[in-house]
């Protein structure tokens, strides 16, 4: 069976199950459980003989059942009908109590394919292939394809965990991570930044044995508090040959913002979650659900705020080694918001070299209303003088139109930016904007120019919006409609941010 046939079959089965009420997200969960079990089974057989041990079935209290069967692929694939469904439910419950990667994969696992015939169909489809012999690029392509389809499913809400791969690869191409260096993502979602960095390092360096072992087991570290997303990340990485099936998990379930664990990294690549405020949900004595704004009171933070993105930005700065590099996707409010936002920007300019900002267009994320930017900065030691001397802006928003499905952003759209960024020597850059070429998207502003702006705002544009004057060359109606929705949603978010600042001032 060809690679494309395998991908097609798995996607088609996802569509069949969707008709039965099993969404892409639920299907992806089940694929994750079953693929993990099948690959573990393959690794226990020749030529691998890895000796992976699986527990016997346990009851609801976690006690081993007398004469219980082993919770593994061999036993599962031998079942049929109601017995299959019953065994699968018990298997998931048993494995969720295990330690390490195994327990993380099966945390809070449930059977969402309750028709035994359909479940058997998925099992048989997976059982036909020798996954351990299949190339990591093929396994990864299958899984990444399912992740993207899940992100497209607006009902699932998975779009917030899926950063467009073209943007991720562009960011990595700018940063150019090196072997034997550590990489962190404190909100790693399904692991897109890790995989792109892995691919970059492997494709651009001839790795020796030490470097291969390091990139497999010691390079990547992250946090993901959502159990379903975390398991997808672990599986996605394992299918790309990162980590060991019986090793410890390098993806923590803890909230990265709660504290500084003291670990420092060479690179941080991240797209912190959408949504401006951090909230904590609880139930009162009457049984009503209450939401409370959550501020992280950390000594290493410049400002205490409930603004989630400002908190992530402060945390990422803390995570970096001296001369460590960061590339972070952040919404517009981080660039212009007053109060805590202004102080965070001033401190960032002072303590790091914030050398580049990429202004992104609307319509590239599956979640609507997101006006985002990528901030590139290098951490620096303490100094009386500000480390940032000039900031280079690339405006890929003005007169740019994209939609996630019909007109997605691709890597070639950002090729000019990568070339102008000049990752090998960012000190050698030349503006494309000038008095003679006022369509140039690449322009620099000095530290003094930025610090003199109202609230030290980094929300800077200089290109003329052609849609205001060139009515004959307007984009397609679908794109216009999408941009109107994006702008309305963004406007509402900006209004909410103003209300939040007023409320914080009152406190």
Image (cartoon, helix red, strand yellow):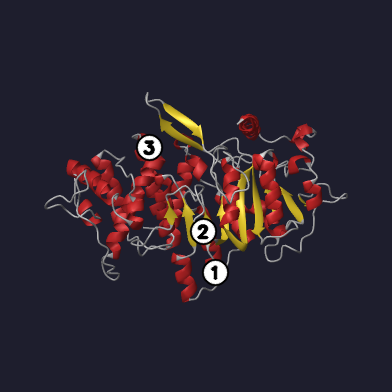
Determine whether 248 is above or below 333 in the image.
Answer: below
What x and y, as percent, mark residue 285?
37, 26
Determine whether 184 is above or below 465 in the image.
Answer: below
Disc 3 secondary structure class = helix
Are there few (<14), some (14-19), or many (20+) residues within 10 Å of tag 3?
some
- Which residue occupies the extreme right position in the image? 436
Are there few (<14), some (14-19), or many (20+) residues within 10 Å of tag 2?
few
Q: Residue at x 74, y 53 (%)?
A: 392
Query: In screen coordinates, is 312 left or right of 20?
Result: right
Q: Nearer the viewer, mark 3 or mark 1?
A: 1
Q: Nearer the viewer, mark 2 or mark 1?
A: 2
Can you identify the residue that label 1 sits on? 179
Which mark sits nearer the N-terminus, 3 or 1?
A: 3
Are there few (<14), some (14-19), or many (20+) residues within 10 Å of tag 1?
many
- Which residue occupies the extreme top position in the image? 286
Image quadrant where residue 471 sits: top right
Q: Which mark is residue 18?
A: 3
Which mark sits nearer the N-terminus, 2 or 1?
A: 1
Q: Which mark is residue 262?
A: 2
Residue 234 in view of the camera: yes
Query: In screen coordinates, is 437 left or right of 2?
Result: right
What x and y, as percent, mark residue 218?
46, 65
Which mark sits nearer the N-terminus, 2 or 3?
A: 3
């Amino acid at each position: 069976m060809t690679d494309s046939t395998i991908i097609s079959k798995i996607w088609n089965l996802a569509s069949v199950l969707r008709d039965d009420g099993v969404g892409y997200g639920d299907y992806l969960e089940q694929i994750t459980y079953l693929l993990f079990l099948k690959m573990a089974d393959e690794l226990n057989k020749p030529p691998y003989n890895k000796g992976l041990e699986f527990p016997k079935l346990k009851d609801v209290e976690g006690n081993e059942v007398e004469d219980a069967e082993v919770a593994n692929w061999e036993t599962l694939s031998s079942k049929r009908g109601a017995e299959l469904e019953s065994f699968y439910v018990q298997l998931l419950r048993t494995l969720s109590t295990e330690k390490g990667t195994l327990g993380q994969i099966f945390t809070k696992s449930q059977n969402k394919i309750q028709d035994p015939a359909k479940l058997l169909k998925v099992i048989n489809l997976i059982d036909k292939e020798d996954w351990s012999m299949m190339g990591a690029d093929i396994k990864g392509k299958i899984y990444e394809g399912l992740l993207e389809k899940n992100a497209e499913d607006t009902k699932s809400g998975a779009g917030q965990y899926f950063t467009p791969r073209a943007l991720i690869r562009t960011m990595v191409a700018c940063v150019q991570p090196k072997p034997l260096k550590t990489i962190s993502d404190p909100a790693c979602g399904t692991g897109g930044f890790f995989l792109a960095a892995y691919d970059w390092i492997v494709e651009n360096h001839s790795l020796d044995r030490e470097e291969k072992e390091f990139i497999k087991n010691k390079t990547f570290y992250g946090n993901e508090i959502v159990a379903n997303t975390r398991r997808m990340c672990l599986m996605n990485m394992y299918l790309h040959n990162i980590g060991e099936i019986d090793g410890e998990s390098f993806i923590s379930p803890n909230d990265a913002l709660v504290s500084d664990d003291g670990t420092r990294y060479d690179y941080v690549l991240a797209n912190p979650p959408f949504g401006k405020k951090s909230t904590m949900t609880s139930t009162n004595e009457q049984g009503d659900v209450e939401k409370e704004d959550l501020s992280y009171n950390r000594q290493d933070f410049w400002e205490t705020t409930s603004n989630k993105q400002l908190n992530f930005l402060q945390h990422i700065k803390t995570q970096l080694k001296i001369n460590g590099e960061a590339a972070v996707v952040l919404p517009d409010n981080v660039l212009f918001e007053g109060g805590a936002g202004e102080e965070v920007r001033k401190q960032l300019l002072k303590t790091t070299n914030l050398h580049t900002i990429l202004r992104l267009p609307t319509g590239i994320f599956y979640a609507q209303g997101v006006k985002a930017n990528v901030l590139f900065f290098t951490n620096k030691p303490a100094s009386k003088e500000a480390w940032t001397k000039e900031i280079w802006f690339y405006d890929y928003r003005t007169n740019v139109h994209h939609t996630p499905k019909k007109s997605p952003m691709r890597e070639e759209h950002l090729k000019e930016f990568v070339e102008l960024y000049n990752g090998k020597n960012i000190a050698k850059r030349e503006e494309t904007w000038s008095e003679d070429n006022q369509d140039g998207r690449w322009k620099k502003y000095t530290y003094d120019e930025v610090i003199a702006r109202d609230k030290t705002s980094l929300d800077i544009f200089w290109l003329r919006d052609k849609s205001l004057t060139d009515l004959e060359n307007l984009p397609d109606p679908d794109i216009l409609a999408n941009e109107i929705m994006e702008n309305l949603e963004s406007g509402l978010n900006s209004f909410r941010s103003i209300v939040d600042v007023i409320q914080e001032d009152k406190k």
